[in-house]
Image: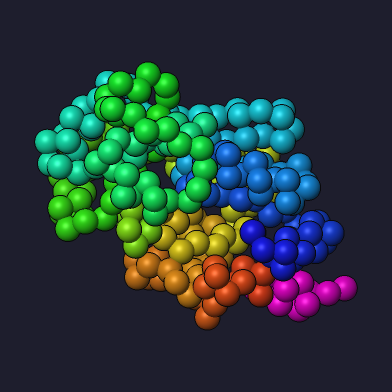
Amino acid sequence: MSRRTQRAIHTCFGRGIIVVPVTARSSYSAAQVLTWLRAPVPVVCQNGAIYFSPVEGRVTKNFPIPSAILQGLLTRLRSQNIPAVLDLDIHKCFSSEAAGLMRRLPRGPSLSVPSPHAIAEPVYTVIIERTEEADSAVDSLSEDFPDLRLVRSSDFTIDITSIRASKVIAVTAICSDFRIEPDSSIAFGDGDNDIEMLSFVGVGIAMANASDRLRQVADVILSYSNDDEGVARFLETLMTENRG
């Protein structure tokens, strides 16, 4: 998070506007964001699989992929030669076959393992690379694993989580905690994993680098991407227009 974005968010806090990070990343990354924000706000990680409450100072909701379903999924992916990275939130685990994908993911604690099947800890997200084979397998995987949610989260990754993990469910909880109507909230996004969230809130805002599917449901499409301070620019304009 850039200093400009931090300043814009702090300005929002000063006006009584709550800004909540909702991300596909792990709580390891979210902890860094909280350090930058210096504010007791909720944090939603792993596409809604983990909800950290600042009121209670702990994770109050978490939805890992059930073990039996995870093993079935890994067996299926292996049979189709689709490498996977397992996100345990504390760290990511990967086998040699998935080393290339691992290098493209955001930096953080990681562990190389002989086989993902050996993992005994809770797994929150299975990440696979968007190859032609993987993209063509999404529909059949969704049909065969109805307890899982598969979303194309970026140009090169597909995220697989428990069906109970949802950014919308998390945003609903946040609105309830702060007694805010969903119609009075806005959300920013750039990937297919943001479609439900942008459709749910009052104003859904897609970044300039947003996927085509997200653009179709967005109320506003910015001319700036994440790398161009798109969120900061929008918040700065919003605060200027509503000054006083």
**x, y percentage for residue 152?**
33, 55
Q: Nearer the viewer, residue 108 or 56?
A: 108
**x, y percentage for residue 197?**
48, 54
**x, y percentage for residue 136?**
15, 54
Magenta portion: prevailing SS class: helix
Q: Nearer the viewer, residue 47 or 116?
A: 116
Applied colour scheme: rainbow
**Is residue 216 depicted above or below 151 in this figure?**
below
Which residue is located at x 38 percent, y 59 percent? 154
Q: Nearer the viewer, residue 89 or 39?
A: 89
Q: Is residue 25 magenta?
A: no
Whether residue 145 sits left or right of residue 112 in the image: it is left
* Magenta-colored span: 234-244
Say which quarter of the image contains residue 98: top left
**Is residue 114 depicted above or below 163 in this figure?**
above
- The quarter of the rendered structure image containing the C terminus is bottom right
Q: Nearer the viewer, residue 197 or 135?
A: 135
**x, y percentage for residue 54?**
72, 36
Which residue is located at x 34 percent, y 66 percent? 213
